[in-house]
Image (cartoon, rainbow, N blue to C red):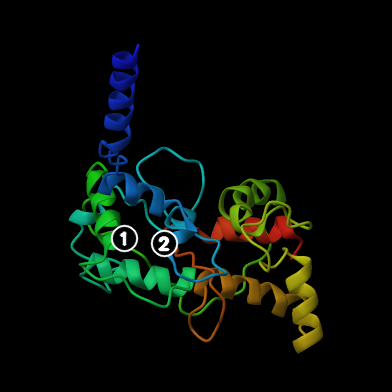
Amino acid sequence: MRRGLLLLCACACAAACAPAAEPSRRSAIEHGRGLFSSPAASDATNNGASCATCHLADQVDPRVLPGHPLAGAVQRPTFWGGQYSELLRSINDCRHYFMGASTPWTREDEQGKAMFAYLSSLPSTRPDALPLTIVRYAADLPAGDAARGRRVYDASCRACHGAAKSGDGALRRGIPVLPDQVVDELRARFGFGDQEIRVAFIEKVRHGPFLGLSGRMPPYAEETLSDADLAAILGYLGL
């Protein structure tokens, strides 16, 4: 009996003293995949956007996003419509302008390496440089077909702004409810009339936070949102 108890104690001690198994670590690709779809890609506390907010990876998706799909991005010779020749710089500009990040990633950062690993794992669907034409002077567009505009709004605007009129499902608090909240502000602050308000909407869609505007909304280039689709959105919003 005593011998059995001693043997049982020895086994228990061996089990307790044995080194614990190391927790399994995510691969760099898995880490990057998580960052791609997470606001954690930015260090800003009020950020609600991720890379996936503006870019598709390689999957078929009905959304109309401002950024190009990223399958094949690591092979592309230039980015941002030919403005940059370095992928990391274009990533950091996206993180800064549209996600509020204050600290750029470097080639040695774990997050930067993970993102590059994930993007490298995507199929080389579009390795060519892709056009991105920013409309410098936003001209007025007559309102288009409202029924078409609803479909385009749901594909391109709703993920961030939420449902029109209510803002239900918006990406984060503080994003303007379209169109009423913006219309009321433009009328109250600047005394804008109907045409001026419509042009202000067009400018925001085309310029994002650039060319004297503010905020974090990325611009929609001609290649990603046509004038006809933008006019249809205006018609749906009653502008």
| Residue lying at 28% horizontally and 72% vertically, measured from the top left | 89
Query: In front here: 140 or 16?
Result: 16
Which of the 4 image quadrants contains residue 1? top left
N-terminal-most mark, 1 or 2: 2
Percent of width and height locating residue 172: 63, 61
- What kind of residue is marked 2? Ala
Percent of width and height locating residue 78: 22, 66
Residue hosting label 1 = 111
| Residue lying at 53% horizontally and 72% vertically, measured from the top left | 216
Percent of width and height locating residue 184: 80, 75
Residue 175 is at least partly visible in this image? yes
Q: Judging from the image, what secondary structure is the residue with disc 2 in?
A: helix
- What kind of residue is marked 1? Gln
Which of the 4 image quadrants contains residue 7? top left
| Residue lying at 65% horizontally and 47% vertically, measured from the top left | 148
Q: Judging from the image, what secondary structure is the residue with disc 1 in?
A: helix
Residue 156 in the figure: left or right of residue 149: left
Q: Which label number is shown at residue 41?
A: 2
**The C terminus lies in quadrant:** bottom right
Percent of width and height locating residue 221: 45, 65
Label 2 crowd bin: few (<14), some (14–19), many (20+), radius 10 Å: many
Q: CA distance from mark 1 to mark 2?
A: 8 Å
Q: Which label number is shown at residue 4?
A: none
